Amino acid sequence: MLRAARDAGVKRVVLTSSFAAIGYGHAPRTKPFDETDWTNPTGDDVQPYVKSKTLAERAAWDFLAKEGSPLELSVVNPVGVFGPVLGRDYSTSILIVQRLMDGAIPGCPKLYFGVVDVRDVADLHLRAMTNPAAKGERFLAVAGDFISMLDIAKVLKSRMGAAGKRVPARQLPNFLVRLASLRDPAVKQILPELGRRKNATNAKAKRVLGWSPRSNEESIVATAESLVRLGLLKDGPQQAA
């Protein structure tokens, strides 16, 4: 893609990478991750998806360095993308809210997430494309401090009224999650992140590009409201085909 862009005379490409290319394969730390950090692809907690995002972004930067091309590159690294959905084809991040609201899980594992609204991710891409200062830079797309799955559940409980009645209000002990992983491969995939607290900063995107994202709570509520509106929750009205 970069080679084709270069050959076509494109001035700048904005690559959608991920926090996955920044915040994994590291020892536990209290310092927030920023754009100078890179995931260690050989780390014990690195799943194939995380490794693929890391290697893909590295390959993009390496291409520009080796080719000596006039093509400019900017990179946006989103955390979990929430916000209003358009239909049934939604991301894994949205699935967290959907499963909580459907009561599909008995409680909240000790997992922590960065949150950003999809509308703010789009806005940051536009800023990275058009602002001269974005040339050759990475930008973390994160609304604020990371929050736990239990925090997300509490927002849904307090803001969604009757639609939030199935949301679990308790945190699951780690040993119960590990037991569940013996039968459910999907649960097994989250074990490396169980109990791991991470954080990231949006200071660079704000300072360099004037980015001003919505709050964690606003993004989570917008997610839930759209799932209700489109009939994408259990026992809700079905969305028209």
Image (cartoon, rainbow, N blue to C red):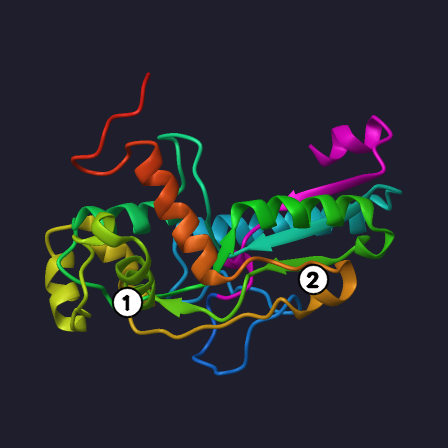
- The amino acid marked with disc number 1 is Leu
Q: Nearer the viewer, residue 124 or 61?
A: 124
Q: Is residue 200 visible?
A: yes
Q: Nearer the viewer, residue 227 or 12?
A: 227
Residue at the (39%, 49%) spot, across then down: 93
Which quadrant of the view contains residue 192?
Answer: bottom left
Residue at the (46%, 47%) spot, across then down: 83
- Other residues around mark 2 within 10 Å, as few (<14) / some (14–19) / many (≥20): many
Q: Which residue is mark 1?
A: 150
Q: Which residue is mark 2?
A: 205
Q: Nearer the viewer, residue 221 or 117?
A: 221
x then y, percent, for residue 100: 24, 52
Which quadrant of the view contains residue 31?
Answer: bottom right
Disc on the earlier residue, 1 or 2? 1
Left or right: residue 218 versus residue 15 is left
Left or right: residue 214 versus residue 203 is left
- Other residues around mark 1 within 10 Å, as few (<14) / some (14–19) / many (≥20): many
- The amino acid marked with disc number 2 is Ala
Residue at the (28%, 61%) spot, across then down: 153
Magenta residue span: 1-23
Up the image or down, 181 lies above or below 99; here it is below
The N terminus - image quarter: top right
Residue at the (16%, 57%) spot, across then down: 181
Element under label 1?
helix
Task: Give me the C-alpha separation between circle 1 and circle 2.
Answer: 28 Å
Which circle marks residue 13 in the picture? none
Residue 151: within the magenta? Answer: no
x then y, percent, for residue 107: 17, 62
x then y, percent, for residue 183: 10, 52
Left or right: residue 102 versus residue 59 is left
